[in-house]
Image: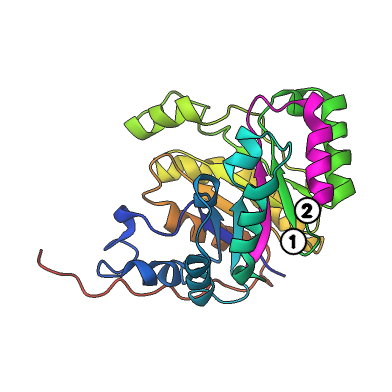
Amino acid sequence: MELHVGCAMWTYVPWQGRYLPRSLSPRDRLSAYATWCTAVEGNTTFYATPTLETVKSWAGQTAPGFRFVLKLPRAVTHERRLADPGEPLRAFLTAIEPLRPRAHALWVQLPPSFGPGDLDLLGGLLRGLPRRYRYCVEVRDRAFFEDPRAERQLERVLDDAGAEWVPFDTTVLFAQSPRSAAEREAWTKKPRLPRRARALTAAPIVRYIGRDDPARTVAGWQPWLETVAGWLHEGRSPTVFIHTPDNVESLDLARRFHEEVRAKVPDLAPLPEPLAVGPPTLF
């Protein structure tokens, strides 16, 4: 019985000295993060394919059970819109090879303009991808959430490939007007979509964004506690990523989410003991 939790990144300046030692070298930050969380979103691979040596260092800093959910390059998903992914996809798949088995899922995040009429392209991509990986798809066209026919069509495409539908729950973010600069920026960038809590596979993945006020973030994730506990009782192994607009406290919040699920599912193993920040300094 496993629940993996994580954040949108493993290195973030506000965490240094607060949750992680201030003096960590760049090559040690992932291993320190991995004492706090057991998964991470691989957002950087959307913007640039890492070198083989960089990926080898990621593997070396994490245990085999750590989960990377790696985003396909934007050249594949946004620029070519899944048509003829060719060289960008081949380069990406070659680069991430050292992560196996840590590459828990390869993440196809599609642009808001990718709608029901484009599903043949998604089906073709998924059929052509190597079977050694698990796949997950995030859509942002509201038709998939509001039109039952479009929802069923997408689920069929995903079922055929054994792929998961990744919900990005932004309902709490948009429930009340923004109260900080980070929240105002998030309002301009994050998708405004209904909450979806249906798993298609044995390894559901959830992205949840709250508010910069931790209490409001915790209050907003309460429906997910029951959902995730139910998945665990069904024998599924979920991964949940916790975001906030400024992400300053997301590392601690991810662990808190795990603890709250564990209170409902006592057989769930605890997270590892986090790396000590170190003694306080005068300056």
Answer with left or right where residue 211 lies relative to residue 81.
Answer: left
Answer with left or right where residue 147 lies relative to residue 188.
Answer: right
Examine the rendered structure and indicate whether residue 269 appears above or below residue 155: below
Looking at the rendering, in which quadrant would you find the C terminus?
A: bottom left
Q: Residue at x 50, y 62 (%)?
A: 51
Q: Position of residue 230 (x, y in %)?
A: 76, 55
Examine the rendered structure and indicate whether residue 243 appears above or below residue 65: above
Contact, mark 1 vs mark 2 (Cβ under 8 Å): yes
- SS class, disc 1: loop
Q: Residue at x 44, y 38 (%)?
A: 211
Residue range (magenta): 102-128
- Between the C-alphas of marks 1 and 2, the distance is 8 Å
Q: Residue furthest front?
A: 87
- The answer to whether residue 200 is visible is no
Instruction: Report the amino acid beneath label 2.
Output: Leu
Residue 147: which quarter of the image?
Answer: top right
The way the protein has been coloured in the rendering is rainbow
Residue 25: which quarter of the image?
Answer: bottom left
Q: Between label 1 and label 2, give the one nearer the viewer.
A: 2
The residue indicated by pointer 2 is 129
Label 1 Cα crowd, 10 Å radius (few <14 / some 14-19 / many 20+): some
Q: Position of residue 225 (x, y in %)?
A: 64, 51
The residue indicated by pointer 1 is 133
- SS class, disc 2: loop
Looking at the rendering, in which quadrant would you find the N terminus?
A: bottom right
